[in-house]
Image: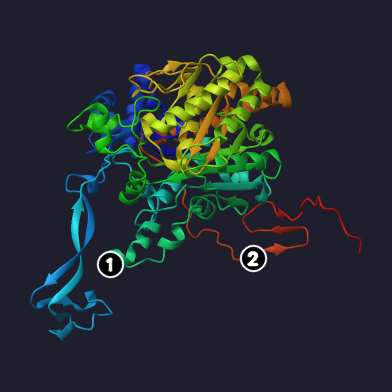
Amino acid sequence: MGGVNAAGRTSGHQAFRRTVIDALPEAEQQALLLGLAALMGLGSCREGAWYDAAGNPIAASRLAENCRAQVLDHTLIRRIEDPRFNDDGLPANRRAGLGLGSELTFSIRRRQLPERLPPTWQVRELDRHTLEVTVPPGELEVLLPETRPAQVRAAGQLPSGFDPSRYYRSVHHPRGLSMSIFAASDCLASCGLEWETLRDRLDPDDIAVYAGNSIGQLDDEGWGGLLKSFVSGNRATSKQMPLGYGQMPADFLNAYVLGSVGGTGAVLGACASFLYNLRLGVEDIRSGQRRAVMVGTSDAPVTPEIIEGFRAMGALADDDSLKALDALELLTDADYQRACRPFARNCGFTIAEASQFVLLLDDALALELGAEILGSVPGVFVNADGWKRSISAPGIGNYITLGKAASLVRDMLGEEALRERTFLHAHGTSTPKNRVTESHVFDLVARANGIEHWPVVAVKAFVGHSQGSAAGDQLTSALGSFAHGILPGIPTLDAVAADVHAERLRFSDTSVPFAADAAFINAKGFGGNNATGVVLSPAVTERLLVKRHGEAAVAAWRERREVTRQVSQAYLAQADGGHYQARYRFGEGVLEGPELDVSATSISIPGYSRPVSLAVDNPFGKLDD
């Protein structure tokens, strides 16, 4: 796994450890603070020695102590740091009609004059670059520049000082795509496997990439800038249209990170997008169609326009609602850090940015390669809501997805494991509607399966709601829980709201130890996009591997895994010191067709050790000649 969100880097469970920092031993807290300080540009490690931001040598313990407050205050949910959201307000325009009582004369640069002028305007040339315009008395329609106070000022933002575009040759890339490059590179480097070695073992068509986001790239470098180019007076660029598409994270991985010619695509399913793409990968591997699949999402929605859209829906926790919730006159930084309150008294979700990627391998390939197995995904279930009044309101599909997921775990691991050693990674958006409807889903499924105390985790309390990447945040957090034996608490949960169906659910405001066999990753997206994924712990996965492949094969895998771990640990040590391996290969190995060797049964591609087989399954029968 690899990526980045408001809690930090995904690899090495850095982001997860940030959410349970108070439950970590002091030495692990120091290591975490140093890694985050390096990510945020507050220090770096070179050849085993630490240096502060100015390049001065400093003891590791001293740097951790000096940076602790900065790291803790500038990760997770916090006041939006984009200067457009400050007290000066968001730049905007207001339509107005000016009643001119007399002629208006002004000078303007030639290139700024509209191409088509009202017929009553008179224009006189002052020099090569300047014109004089005279407008007669009457009504003049104008746009008056203004600033509007930001009504939402809290978001889950990447750690302050971290910019993913700094680590490769980014040229006007939308933020979501820069995050994709960093996240996929982090995933590949941390897995300890050489991508080219893995690729050479497989038919190129055995590989697939399923990655996207929920609403495309809507910042100024993508469709956001394109759609407002006319009214803002800016010129559209040649990159804004193509780079804005929602499947572009997959396209970037194929073209610049992996060089893959295998399967590709993206499913956009609102807040369930990560699980939709995960399902594609899991089904491809289960069917034998693919053997290695990169799955991910990347969302960067912390922009004024997207925030205003969700605010207009009444979905976001805006400043006025937060003040009313706590009877406050003013909001402090500490109040913004508590904006997201799943299953408590709350007023809306907190928007966030994140990019998460996982590498899926079939079990035989994982054993053969000596891969580090963080967990396994036996199934992802998707169901719609049926008839609805409001397209954004919750419906019944989530009862089906969670019910199927629980049934799978019961069948694979047994009733005791389901009841005693599983936990729920809730969608937990922090809206009043979600706390009631999702808890009711949990309650009914718990009753149906005899579960008395089902632990609930709601990671959005830390990192916010990253839209299509939300389930990626949940899945990678669940893998952290398996590795550390800790479930993150819900620190903003002062008390469970009275309308939450909590009788059979277990909530905690602090981190708690828990030995889990499986986790349920739940998503309830706008429009009826419901999904629940099952992820099994590494220990359970090993037991299943022994049952399928035998103890000898698993023992041989453990030996091969030692080499993988050494490579992975070397990268993680470098990354924790602020040195990352962004993989971006622009213009390398470009092929256009004439270089291929095409036969009736295969296509050989220069640079790929194995040809693409053209043999396909035909379940339809044959016609006689």
394 on left or right of 261: left
Q: Amino acid at mark 1?
A: Gly
Q: Which label was assigned to residue 233?
A: 1
On the question of residue 430 being in view, the answer is no
95 on left or right of 603: left
Q: Which label was assigned to residue 133?
A: none
Which of the 4 image quadrants contains residue 108? bottom left
Distance from Cα at disc 1 to Cα at disc 2: 45 Å
* Residue under the point 33% across and 51% down: 305
Q: Amino acid at mark 2?
A: Glu
> Callout 1: helix, strand or loop?
loop
* Residue under the point 45% across and 45% down: 298
Q: Position of residue 46 (x, y in %)?
A: 34, 35
Q: Position of residue 512 (x, y in %)?
A: 43, 16
441 and 582: which one is in front? 441
488 and 490: which one is in front? 490
| Label 1, residues with CA under 10 Å away: few <14, some 14-19, many ≥20 | few
Q: Give the quarter of the figure containing the C terminus.
A: bottom right
Q: Position of residue 508 (x, y in %)?
A: 40, 18
Tally the numbered discs. Answer: 2
Residue highlighted by disc 2: 595
Q: Residue furthest front?
A: 389
> Callout 2: helix, strand or loop?
loop
Q: Nearer the N terminus, badge 1 or badge 2? A: 1
On the question of residue 187 being in view, the answer is yes
Which of the 4 image quadrants contains residue 360? top right
Which of the 4 image quadrants contains residue 30? top left
